Amino acid sequence: MAKKRRESKRKTPQEEPRPRLSFERILVYAIAFTLFMIPLFLWPGISEYGYGKTMVAVIAVSILTILWGLTAWQKRGWTLRVPWIAFPFLGLVIASLLSLLAAINGRVVVQSLILVVFFFQLGFLIANVVREKRDVTLLLGAVLVSAFLASGYGLLQYLGTLPGAPNATGLHRIISTMGNRNFLGGFLSYLLLPSFVLLLRPRSKCIRAAALLLIAFNFGMLMLVNQMAPMVGLVAAVVVLVAGLVVFRPIEPIRRNRAWLIALLAILAITFLIEAPSGPLNSVVGLSQGETSWIGRVWERNSGRTRELDWWVGFEMLKAHPLTGVGLGNYKLSFLPYKAAFLSTPRGEAYADLRVSRAAQAHGDYVQVAAELGVLGLLALIGAVAALGVSLWKRLRRNLDEPDRLDLLLYAAGLVVFLVHALVSFPAHLPTSMLMIVVLLGLIYAPAYGDSCVVTVRLSRRLGAIALGAASVFAVVVSAFAISDLSANMLMYSGSQILRVGEASDAKRVLERSLALDFAPRQTYYYLASAQMTLGQGEAALESLEKCFTRFVDENTYLIYADLATNLGHLEEARHAIDFLLSTRPKSEIEWKARYVQATIAVRLRDYGGAERLLQTLASDAPSFELASIALGNLYHAQGRTTEARAAYARALDLIDGKLAEAEASLAGRTQFTVDEYGALSHAVSTLRSERSFVLEQLAKLPAAE
């Protein structure tokens, strides 16, 4: 009897052990939340969608890393699973550090490398902590739901229900939470085939049905954004997937889920027929109207030739620095100088008609790796792809579980889409695209699918504590810089908006605060120079513009610098800047202004005959450019050539009156403007009115016609 009472006492609910949420489970949920949040993250006052996502991703990965260390501390030891791909990645890090040798801006190299390391760290984390299939479902589900919400947002923009890109119509309204419909299309294409796992793995029919609907909706949005390269990537991925199915034969999960797969494939096929630009049903529903066919877009010479120019410029960078490249993240800073060098070659003459003022990316990630990291970077990249391929093959061969094999093949298919897309675009430089890729890499190497192709490193509690401390300090320092940079970016954006409405003094104060917080400031110096010029601080503005040459390299920067240097009497510096700018074959309006400044320099050097020839040629080449006529009028007036001066001023006045009437009509005819639009129109009206007053004043000074 006493024994029964003791057993009854032990079974009392109050004394049963309560389930405890471990650090490891918290970590998995935190990773899932991060994957859900980053594609959707938006914050008012940040200059660019991807920048905000990137900084938030760095902070999130820092927190996740510290939390991972705490889970190891709880277990009294830290076991690290190092995937094979980590070793060529280490080579990529070394190549990035060596690229500092030729970099225009070393801080950009450091900043870019930190971002690369932190995104890899997220994949490394997933490869260590995802041990159960429920965690796979959780992470993929978080990304799928996030993609669905981003797609829904883009669809509402397309329909006009929510505001999209300013002054855009149709598909061009779609920016979603990505900043560009191309970026949304890439993200959805990498996710499409891996998301099939959510149709095959869960036991719940409700979860499967929800996954089917979300996958179908995302595919519909992928078709709607109408991007060629991701679709080509999907075709290549399907070919690879079919080959994998034939070789590794994961028949059982396909047979068991055949009804769900047939339903999904049928929905996708119908969606394709409805939404494909050249599809037989598109003319009925009217989606993607006005877009060219896929074949037409492939042969769009302007877009293709622009990419070719970017690639040839990258090749010039590789030739100049074959071993180390021009520096990680420095392609955009080196583009104009190497573009000028390329256009001076016989091959470059074929691209002289293309007016590309700057290129933030090479529109080809492999080209950009070669340009920025040289041969060493290319070897590291090839090593990473080879390590991934070998790892996939071995993990597929050694894993006897057929559902696992099918999962791995679907992840590989998602990576194939990315690798194909990277041939003609820059998905490796987009936070949402890289997020999807590191998730796939992490899942491929995760313990949920076996332990092959990883090197296990076990740290004692003491060594683990040291590693945790070092990782925590590093994470906190990098996060502090990320928060500081994010604050600097918001201040820069605020300062630029204040500047556009004419408050130069306030803008200058805000921009200087931004510079104090920014680790690697770029166009902030450009905006600061604009504020300084407005305030009459010419020498300070010239110094700010000089700093742009290693931070924000743009045609307009060189033009403004040359014009300001001319006005301040720094004629040699101005002449060098103009000669360089013209060698880059700038856009027409920039070229006209550059040639005008060139003539102004000639006047300052008292080469009046040369100035006249330059201005007459400019007036002939650009008959709508009123400044050439004004300058000719000034030159003739100074030389006492009254009749020619009057004709030049009259021609300028006619041009000014026409442009002024058009600008004033635009300003008066609309009730809603963006800050940029209002600032540009207001500045144009103010400039034209000032020019008109000057011309009338000069005409009044001329002797009366006989």
Image (tube, helix red, strand yellow):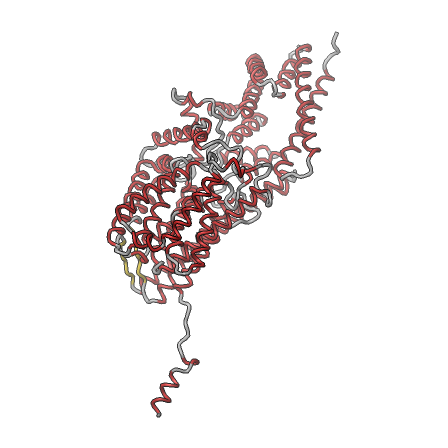
Tell me, yes or no, if residue 644 can be seen here. yes
Measured as percent of width and height from the top left, residue 350 is found at 42, 21
Q: Is residue 197 left or right of residue 514?
A: left
In this rendering, position of residue 34 left or right of residue 248:
right
State the image quarter where residue 682 is shown: top right
- The residue sitting at the top extreme is 706
Comparing 12 with 680, the one in front is 12
Between 668 and 394, the one lying in front of the other is 394
Q: Quadrant of residue 527?
A: top right
Seen from the viewer's position, the closer of residues 341 and 513 is: 341
Quadrant containing the C terminus in the rendered view? top right
| Position above or below: 545 against 456 | above
Which residue is located at x 25 percent, y 50 percent? 394
Q: Quadrant of the N terminus?
A: bottom left
Q: For residue 330, say whether it is visible.
A: no
Which one is in front, 430 or 143?
143
Describe residue 377's horizontal placement relative to residue 552 as left or right: left
Name the spot of residue 107 as percent of width and height, x first. Answer: 43, 42
Residue drawn 31% across the image and 56% down it? 449
Q: Position of residue 438 (x, y in %)?
A: 38, 49
Q: Residue at the spot x=36%, y=37% of the render?
A: 366
Indicate whether 366 appears above or below 613. Answer: below
